[in-house]
Structure formats: structure tokens, C-alpha cells
Image: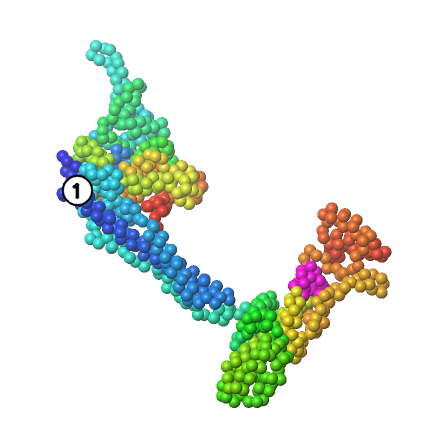
Amino acid sequence: MNDEARLSAAHEWLNALRRQIGRRIVGHHDIVDGILACLLSSGHVLLEGVPGLGKTLLVKTLSDALHLEFARIQFTPDLMPSDIIGTQVVLQDEEGRRHFHFQRGPVFTQLLLADEINRATPKTQSALLEAMEEKRVTVGRIGHALQEPFMVLATQNPIEMEGTYPLPEAQLDRFLLKLNATYPDADELSQIVDRTTGWPMPSVEPVLSAGDVMALRELVRSVVLAAHVKDYAIRMVLATHAGNAEATPLVRRYVRHGASPRGLQAIVLAAKALALFAGRINVSFDDLAAAAPAALRHRVLLNFEAEAEGIDVEDLIAEVVRETPIVPGKASD
Amino acid sequence: MSQTSDAPSLWIGLEGPGQAREQLRRFVAALTRARRLQILVDHAFGGLLAGLCLASVAVLAARQAPSTYPIWQLAGITIAVALAVALVLGWWRRPKALEVAIRADLTLRLKQRLSTAWELMTVHGDDALTERLAVQAVRARLPARPGTVFPLRINRWGRLAPVAATALLLAGVVDLGGMQPPTPRKVDEQVVDEGQRLGAFGREMRARAQRDKLPRSTRQAAQLERLGAHMESGTLTRDQALGQLARMGESLDQERMQALAEANPSERSSQRAMNAQRSSVAPDLNPDAMLERMQRGALGRDDTRALTQRLDDLERAGIPRKAMQNALERHLAGADDALREILEKLARLTRALKEDEELSKAFEAVGRAQDNLGSARGASDGHSGSIAMDWDEDEGANRDAKGALSARAEERVNSLGKGSRAASQADSSTATDRSDAPLPPRADPAGRVVRPHGQQRAGEEFTSQGRMLPRSNRPTVENVPTGSEFAAQAEAVLSREHYPEHHKEFVRRYFLNLSQGAHASPEQPPAREAQRE
């Protein structure tokens, strides 16, 4: 299959995947695109929203639309790391000899839904670090590779703080994008009621296999990023650093730590996926600007003053995107 | 985040190999030319605006300063230079192709298809990826005419140009004096009075100059009249009036010198002619009338007799006796050319002398106004609370300057000769010789050496009233004879200590009283008195 055919097929696959998800999920187009961008960029996604917005349903629908193994872990305060990655159990063979056997945990899957991830202790949350970054799990002295494609979709509730453990920065940085689920509007609510309270329930057919997903991942990485477009992404990330000359006034005042290089990688990879969704083989400034909020909102850490004054990181990133010049020194004529 | 809605197409098929790249090269080249033309036009508008602004400033400056350069020519040159500089800068600022492609991408909303393809073409050359990008760019709504991407438009500088042009027009035609808002400031009555006098003098002088057909005097009289009106309007401060009077005096002096020089280029003979002519001025010797009669052929015996009788005077005026006699003989023989030449020369001398007289009178009138204003300022600046001036160092310098001015004026008046002096004194009832030298210190009946607080010079009398505030940080004590017995010690002690100034003054007075043999007065320091009050 040549490049043209691959791209045609990719577009067909993506449209089909969207259609399948759209049969069950109403609205949330940005979130769907974000999750697909993460899937095609080999990243993980953190979904944040109040209960009842369909976060878990969205992830389950995605798993239904893909020929991928799916597992779900409901994070609770008493969840242990071994409950995620697995544990050594003692087995007795037919000859009566006993030996240790590694019992794989639910992390050994392809799509892992970590529901309400902030309810588990940091120790348990950290059990996912190696799996997310290196796609493997080490138990004792033995490392166990995870099956590709592997993707973690975590959800968390931003309003219930009691009995929760906010994700540490290292854990947050592992998520390529953080997507915020918002309330649906009236039309969307009407459709939701029709679909979820009637009969038959909408069904979703799987349209992509693991091999298709891996092929799409290759295609995403082959999207061209021109040097002047890359400069824009770099300047945008540097603008989140309070000490940088290109930092905006809000950043200078309220940011404790700016985005890491992983943030820049996240912006570029997500932008490449978005360019592919749009049928282009080059990244545009708009792709980067569209990917920036989801890639930066969990990587920019605000200081105490910002917390005290109720500064929203979304406003801060919006200002960064707005104020970063597309072409440095571009005349306004 | 969704961009799928505006996806133009799925994927673009390849056409002929290299065709898309060549098309892209041509398009970017055309875009670059269009952008360059746009930059030139933009710079032209910028230069035009800058030129108009600079021209407005230049015109204003030219109108304020006594410049004879035509203001519109000045404005034209300024605009042309600014325009030329802007165009040269625009010519040197060549746009880069990648920059042009980026701008075109933004303008045409091509999602960086064009700039990415161009960048990879220039970096990677001719590979398959470049070709695919080129095809993608060429297929993406490229306009047929690059001029639509970079149109020749009126930029913000161009939009501001009419405003600047209006400002230039206003700067050139509006009466600046009339534009100044009426500021409620105190009118200096002395300046107004001098303005009235100068205005009246200017009107009389202009009438005389027009009657005698003296162009220089007419012009200067008009200027004098304008200056008088300006001063009379009360808009000039005393310093401004003095400055304008000084310039007027210089102008009058130059005009007078030029009049004499034109009448007779040789200064020595000019002076001699002037002296002779002053003595030969008489109703019966009018060269202009004689020339007129000669042209009519009616030069009579009375005229030749008058000329014959004034041979000595004419010789002093630079006309040799022999030449005059020859001219008269030739006239009697029927040839008037020599006599006409002499009479024309005489007419020129007469006119120059009249110009000299009028301008000298004006010069003196200006000098009087300067003196009066300068003296009155000295009186109003005094700090003694009386009419008499308290000569401090600054006023002494002022006085020196005025003395120099008066000396210069006197020198010029002396150079004019007796006739001129008499005429000027006849015109002015206030012109008197004044001595600017201060009165010397003298011994009073008690044997103390005193010097005057100030003095009012002889001449025009005036009175003024004023309420003087004490200077800050300076004691307001009256002049007293300076004792030296304890003064040095007191000053030495006071200079070492950091006391408030009024306490120092109290101590100083105490020791000075001691030095004069008086008892120490039981007065308290001023601050304490003030507290009691």
C-alpha cells in the first residue's frame, strides 16, 4: 500500500471510528478528537469532569469500537499496586512442588480505564508510572512487556476532594492530554435522553484493529512539521515559563513551573494527529493552538498567589496562545 | 479542537513529476514580487507621512524665525527628501521567499501548506515528500493573481497622510499670533506705553518716508509700527519686548549702513559726503528737482548759480570743484551729460542721507524704549520695598549691560553728526544724555562711609509701587555699615556651626552691634518672636 492509499484508508478509518462513537456518545466532539489524538500519538489521556457527563461511557464506547482488549479498574483508597499490575502467587504442580507464578493484573490490556484515579493512594497511582511511560511492568526482577497499543484513559472528578489524592506532578506529566468534559447543551441533552431511555440501546461495532491503530500511529508521526511552525510551538511552551522573556504578564505573576519538554512533545504529537484528521500532511499554526490547552493545562503549575486569587489555568493558557506571535517580529501591517 | 469540519479533501494525487514544484516556485516568485511592490508602496506612504510632519514643523519654524526662505519650497523639499529616503529603505528591504509564503498562508488560510512545502523544497530539494507537499499546496486554493494576496493598499500611514497634509496647510496659512488662546496674564503697563510711543513714532516715520520716497525707511517704519502694536496689545512680557527691541535696533542699524554704502561704496568718501551734504542741505539745492527741470530743458540760471555758490560744499561731498565747473561749462555749451551725472550722484547722496536720518531717529526711539523698559525692570525687581533699586550682583550686571547698550547708542548718535542729533532731539522730548555710572560711596555727617541703596538716573521721571516678598533663605535686613571688629570671628564661628539661618542672623547682628559700640539689644531670634505671636 503506497502513501496515498494509506492516507485514504486512514481517513476512512477515522471517519468510521467517529461514526461508531457518535452512535452512542452525543456531543463531546473535542473530547473524542482528543482521545483519538492520544490513541494515535501513543499517549494517555486524563478525563476530568463532574459525574454523569459520560466519561466512562465514552471510554467504554471507544473500546467497543476498537478490536482491542479492554480493562477497567475502579480506583478506591484501599486499592493496592498489586491489584493493578498483578502479584506473585504460589502454585502447586502435579508433582506437589510449589513455585511462584506471576498473576497478571488488569494493567495487562490495551485500553485501560482507570476510573476515578484520584481516589487511590499515591502509592497505587504510581504503580501506573512505568506502565504508562515504558509500556512494561516490573515485578520483582522480571519485567513484563505490555501489549501494543497500550493506552490509559483515566477519569477524575474535580469537585469531590474529600478522600481523594491529587495526582502527583510526575503522574500528571505522563498523560499526553488532559481533557475537560463539559455539560451538554439542550439539543445534546434531548438526544442523550432519547438514546439512553429508549429501546433498543444503540450498539457500536468494532472498526479498527490493533494493527490499524499501529499503522495510524506511524502515519501520524510522518506528518511534516515545518521549522517555522515548530518555532511557534517552542515559543508557546517557553511562554509558560515565568522567567522567560516571552512570558505573558499572567504567567510572570502566577506560574510556579511552566511546561516541560514533554509538554512540547505532547503539543506537536497532538497537532500532528489533528492535521491528519483534517486531511493534511503538514502541521499548521491552528493545529498547535488547538492542541495547546489540552497539552498544557495539567503541566503548568500555578503558585500560591494564583490559588489564592482563584486564577484559572485555562485563562492563563488562553493568554499564552493568544499572545504568542505566529511569526516572531511580524509587522502588524 | 475539531478540525474535521473544514477538511478540504482527503488526499491529493500526484500529477506530472516536478510539475507541482515548478508551479509552486513560480507562484512564490510572483508573490515575492508583489510583496516587494507592496513594501515599496507602504514605505512611500510612511515617507509621505513623515515628510508632511517634518514639513509642518519646518514651516512653523520658518514662520517663527526671521527666515526669507519660501516656506512652500521648504515644505516641498522636505517631503521629497523624506519620500526618497523611505523609498530607498523600502528598496533595500527585500522580502524573503519563506516570509512571503508564511504571509500568504496566513492571508489565504492555507493552514501552512504553502510555507511548509516551500521550506521543505528549499531544504530537502526534490524528494517524494516535497513533491507531495507541493501538490498539496498547489491544489489548495492558490489565487491566480498574487496581487490579491499582497494588494497595493493605503496603509495606516497613508490614511494619516491627509491629516498631516491638513496640518501642513494650517501651519502655512494660519495666523499663529491669532491662534494663541487669550492667556489671562498681567499686562505690563510700561511695555504698553512704550508700544504706544513706538507705534506713533512708526506712523509718523512712515508718512515722512513715503512723502520723501525713502523705501528703506518706509519698510522699517512699518516694522516699527507692527512692533509697537504688538507691544501695545499687552501680549509681550518685558523680556520679550526687550528682545524684539534689540532685534529691531540691529535691523535699523544694518539698514542705515546699507543705505550709506549703496549711496557711496567708499566709506571714507561716504562719510565726507555725508558731512558735506548735511551742511549743504538747503531748500534752494534740490538735486531731484534740478534733474527734473533738466529733463524738461528748464534748468535755469538760478540753478546754475546755486550750484556755483556751493562748489565748496559739493567738493566736501565728493564732487571735485573742477569737475563741477567743467560740467557747468558743458551745460552752458549745451551738453548736459556731465551735469546730469553729478546731479544724479547728488540725488543719491541726498536720499541716503535722508534714509540715514530717518533710520537714526528710529534707532534712537528704539534705544529709548529699551532704556525705559530696562530701567523700569530694575526698579520692579528691587527688594528694598522702595523705589530705589537695591543693586545686587545680578542687577549690577544688568546695569553694565544697559550701560554698554547706552554707550553703543551714544557712539552711533555721535557718528551721525550734529544735524542728525539736532533733528532727533527735536523729535523727542525725552532724549537726554544720561549717565549710567553709579554714585560713588561718600562719607555721611557722622563720619561713616555709606553707599546708596540704589539710584535713579537723570532723565524721564517715573514712579512705581510694588510689594516685595522677602527672598527665601535670605535675611531681609537693611544695609548697614559693615563693621570689621568682630565680624570675622563671628563669621568664622557661624560657618562652622549648623544653626538655622535666622539664628545665625541674630548672632551676626549681635556682634555687629558690639563692633559699633552699641549695646546688645534684648531682641529674640525671629523664630521665637514668631512663636510668641
Q: Tell me where residue A253 sits by quadrant.
A: top left
User: Does residue A96 appear in this view?
Assistant: yes
Spot occupied by residue B99 in the image (x, y as percentages of width and height): 30, 46
Residue at the image position 32 percent from the left and 46 percent from the top: A326
Quarter of the picture containing the C terminus of chain B is bottom right
Per the image, label 1 sits on a secondary structure element best described as loop
Say whether residue B308 is magenta: no
Residue drawn at point x = 67 percent, y = 63 percent: B400
Give the camera-side residue of B150 and B378.
B378
Q: Which residue is mark 1?
A: B18
Label 1 marks which chain's residue?
A: B
Amino acid under disc 1 = Gly
Q: Is residue B60 left or right of residue B511?
A: left
Judged left or right of residue A119, residue B396 is right
Where residue A85 appears, as percent x and y from the top left, is: 28, 25
Compared with A50, A89 (above or below) is: above
Quadrant location of the N terminus of chain B in the rendered image = top left
| Residue B277 shows in the view | no
Considering depth in this image, is B163 or A43 the residue closer to the camera? B163
Please tell me how crowded label 1 is: few (under 14), some (14-19), or many (20+) other residues with Cα within 10 Å. Answer: some
- Between A265 and A57, the one lying in front of the other is A265
Residue B353 at x, y percent in the picture: 58, 77
From this view, report whether residue A48 is shown above or below residue B522: above
Foreground residue, B220 or B43? B220
Rendered location of residue A259, percent (x, y): 36, 37
Residue B204 found in image quarter: bottom right
Relative horizontal placement of residue B62, taking residue B127 as reference (left or right)? right
Magenta residues (range): B381-403
Residue B386: say if magenta.
yes
Residue located 59% across and 72% down the image: B269
